[in-house]
Image: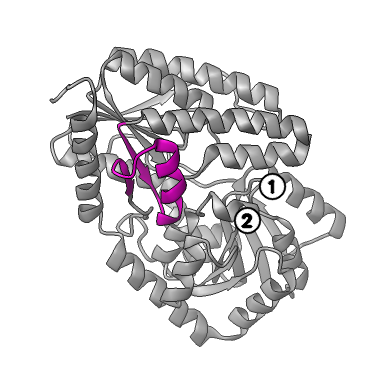
Amino acid sequence: MKLLVHDYAGHPSQVHLSRQLAVRGHDVTHAYFAEDPGPKGVLHSQKDDPPSLHFVAISIGRPYDKSSLVTRHVNDVEYGRRATEFIKDLSPDVVISGNTPSEAQAAIMRASKAVQASFVYWMQDFYSIAVGTLLRKRLGIVGAIIGWYYRFLERRQLRESDAVVVITDDFRPLAAAWARSNDKVHTIENWASFDDLSLFMKKNDWSREHGLDDRFVFLYTGTLGRRNNPGFLVRLAQECDSGACVVVVGQGVGMKQLEAAKAEHRLESLRLLPLQPATRFPEVLATGDVLVGLLETDAGTFSVPSKVQSYLCAGRPILLAAPSGNLAARNLASEDAGIVVGPQDQAGFAAAAAQLRDNPELRERLGANGRAYAVRTFDIIKITNCFEKVLRMAVNRSSFGKHP
């Protein structure tokens, strides 16, 4: 098949899938948003990649600003326009698209139909619910009305898709209801490539470069957005003595809040660093003695923190503040791979952090359990098999009858 794997964010797992699909003989183009500031995979050809794998950065020609709702909307519309032009030129057989704002996703779907490509909606979260929750908090009734519009868009997109992939069974009931079909909704949980996340020692080049090789490190990596409460990290830094620190390697609106808190409270134990290249990511994770995740109460119903999959591969214990019913929290609890506290329980979070710091045997057990779970579960061969099955079903279901 001639496939377009469109991952707006350019995340590592989606790149991993594209590589595997290309190895199996598909002609794969992996497209992503050039100006998105979040964590990225290796988005260029490597020496072992087949010639049928191509990478394309779709650019809007200006920085992407999430702080202004109006500017963000304009940029999303412009991105959709640029993606539409690209899809019409490429004319793939199947488009699989995820992590994409609703306006841009709508344009991508229209372009797919225009070239008679089957369309697979890869649902990493309920974008419309996330946006609606945020807007309702910020704008009241006006925000609720705008949120209703986004739900209308997302419902229509699910209904018009040839297949829908959700990352947890928790999403299935609502996704099937919005899609008006149980049969076209498929669950494929997120994963991380443990082959790409080699186990490093605590003392490595990256930890030495940043003076962290001899300190106890609570590490948070990735986007720190509105669904993550930076107050937990501030509290944790305040609890640290001179031998420990909190290191945040990330981007997002929460980083500005941490910068302000660091200055206000003179938190020498709080280190803030930008996102690192994908090639340094294993060293970054190995620098952490405890890896930290955060998810707000409202976000627990529509989101699963994907960073937990990478954390599991690193062989480090995980400290997660999240609703207990969230898939990531359930997995950590069932696999004995970390400690989970409630998303409002800062005191419990600090107590769990102290427990982990004082108990090296506990840290070793939790980290080993997490790595074993990743090796056992994140089987890219089985995962790619599942996606190929979904792609074939999407083609068979499509009204275009475009069978490559």
In this rendering, the answer to whether 26 lies above or below 325 is above
How far apart are labels 2 and 1 at the CA level? 8 Å
What amino acid is found at the position of numbered circle 1 in the picture?
A: Met
Q: Position of residue 218 (x, y in %)?
A: 61, 67
Which one is in front, 81 or 30? 81
Whether residue 49 appears in this view of the structure is no
Numbered circle sitting on residue 248: 2
Q: Which disc, if any, is residue 255?
A: 1
Does the magenta portion include 165? yes
Residue at 33% of width from left, 72% of height from top?
372
Q: Is residue 348 above or below residue 24?
A: below
Find numbered disc 1 in the image and state the secondary structure of the residue it sits on: helix
Earlier residue among tags 2 and 1: 2
Query: Given contact means CB atoms under 8 Å apart, are the residues at marks 2 and 1 in contact?
Result: yes
Give the residue type at disc 2. Answer: Val
Which residue occupies 41% across, 75% down? 335
Taking the view exactly as shown, the residue that stands out farthest to the right is 264
144 or 17, which lies in front? 144
- Residue shown at the point (39%, 23%) measured from the top left: 109
Residue 75 shown left or right of residue 185 in the figure: right
Front residue of this view, candidates 165 and 225: 165
Q: Secondary structure at mark 2?
A: strand
Q: Quadrant of the C terminus?
A: top left
Give the position of the N terminus as an image quadrant. Answer: top left
Give the number of the disc on residue 170. none
Q: Which residues are magenta?
A: 162-186
Question: Could you classify mark 2 by the number of other residues whose Cα lies within 10 Å: few (under 14), some (14-19), or many (20 or more)?
Answer: many
What is the quadrant of residue 268 in the picture? bottom right
- Residue 111 is covered by the magenta coloring: no
Relative image position of residue 215 (x, y in whole percent): 62, 71
| Residue at x 56%, y 67% (from the top left corner) | 324
